[in-house]
Amino acid sequence: MSSETRFPSDCSLDVVGIGNAIVDVLVQTDDGFIAEHGLQKGGMALIDEQQAEALYKASGTGLETSGGSVANTMVGIAQLGGRAGFIGRVRDDQLGSIFSHDIRAVGARFETPAATSGATTARCLIYVTPDAERTMCTFLGASTQLEPEDLDLSMVKQAKVLYLEGYLWDSPAAKRAFIAAAEACREAGGKVALSLSDGFCVDRHRASFLELVNGHVDVLFANDVEIQSLYETDDFDQALERVRGCCSVIAITRGAQGSVVLSGDQRWDMGIFGLGDLVDTTGAGDLYAGGFLHGFTQGESLERCGELGALCAGQIVTQLGARSQVSLKQLAETHLN
């Protein structure tokens, strides 16, 4: 699986992502705030609307920006010059308008109609401590209202790769949409990629994820915590041996230790790009996947895909938020040519 990967010749999109449409509220704070509110540092907790409002009021000034794991990845692909589309549900409210505007402004296709009733647009309160670690509290809101009938399967069938986020498994309706889209993509000759999303997400849905990884996913993205959680081991190399061969391509990020890419009996250990001071790790995995998938759909070698992923991740951790403030395309031209 490298430059020899075959995609249908008539694809009008490189990657279509399905995920939670979320507006991020990034707040720089200290460990005291994390402890005071009983938050699990470095984790992602699902909260209800009442909790979201209470935490929002208790927080200091924040930066509001469109987010959502797969949406961040699609924006990264679009910024690299790829053809990306996103499917996800927002409400017809202020945060929904922010999300819709931001993702379309970078050139990604987003055509899912906004919900006119029900829960408000999802938001994620992201607390960034001085060590650049991020602690996330997510209210999923309208994003959980995504149903199979809301899917634009014509968009899915036009994609070389369909990219799905594990967080969708927290909503039964979104889970059904996820499966329907994967089947449509496969029937059209496309590849299916999955992000395990979060260690706590893996804990909640381990049996389902193991079933998915064993034969239903072509490209798997995870970090070291998630892959070890999936196989319930503290040994990273043991987890790699367990997952090896389950998918055609496996990309595992390891923070400051770089990443590992597996395909068949081949392994590439990738370093990191130190492009500046570490400010915020929000979106590092999302942008790694964006760079990797862009290379993958352009027929690059898997080693090159890993380098492009590492470069995008290396850039995003030097700024606040998961949407790059510099041109990723120019960055790649500068560092990888």
Image (spheres, rainbow, N blue to C red):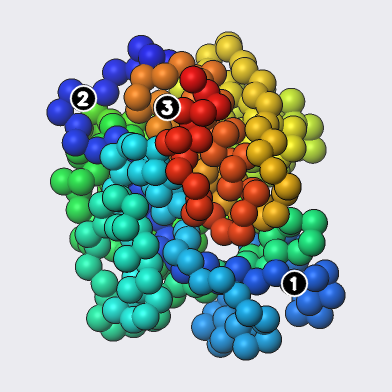
Q: Amino acid at mark 1?
A: Thr
Between residue 335 and residue 161, name the one nearer to us. Answer: 335
Tell me the element at label 1: loop
Q: Is any part of residue 250 visible from this angle? A: no
Q: Nearer the viewer, residue 322 or 183?
A: 322
Q: Whole-percent x and y of residue 314?
A: 62, 39
Q: Nearer the viewer, residue 90 or 26?
A: 26
Measured in 3D between alpha carbons, the distance from the residue under mark 1 to the one under mark 2, in whole angstroms, is 48 Å
Measured as percent of width and height from the top left, residue 295 is found at: 42, 27
The three-letter code of the residue at mark 3 reads Gly
Q: Nearer the viewer, mark 1 or mark 2?
A: 1
Amino acid carrying label 2: it is Pro
Residue beneath the point at 41% across and 26% down: 296
Few, some or many residues within 10 Å of mark 1 (<14, 14–19, 20+): some
Tell me the quarter of the picture where residue 204 sits: bottom right
Q: Residue beneath label 3, please?
A: 295
Q: Are marks 1 and 2 in contact (CB under 8 Å)?
A: no
N-term mark: 1 or 2? 2
Q: Which residue is mark 1?
A: 29
Q: Residues within 10 Å of mark 3 (few under 14, many from 20)?
A: many
Compared with 94, 23 (above or below) is above
Mark 2 crowdedness (10 Å alpha carbons): few <14, some 14-19, many ≥20: few
Are dots 1 and 3 in contact, CB under 8 Å?
Answer: no
Q: Quarter of the image holding residue 262?
A: top right
Q: Is residue 133 left or right of residue 223?
A: right
Q: Position of residue 140 (x, y in %)?
A: 47, 70
Q: Residue at x 67, y 81 (%)?
A: 60
Q: Nearer the viewer, mark 3 or mark 2?
A: 3
Residue 8, numbered label: 2
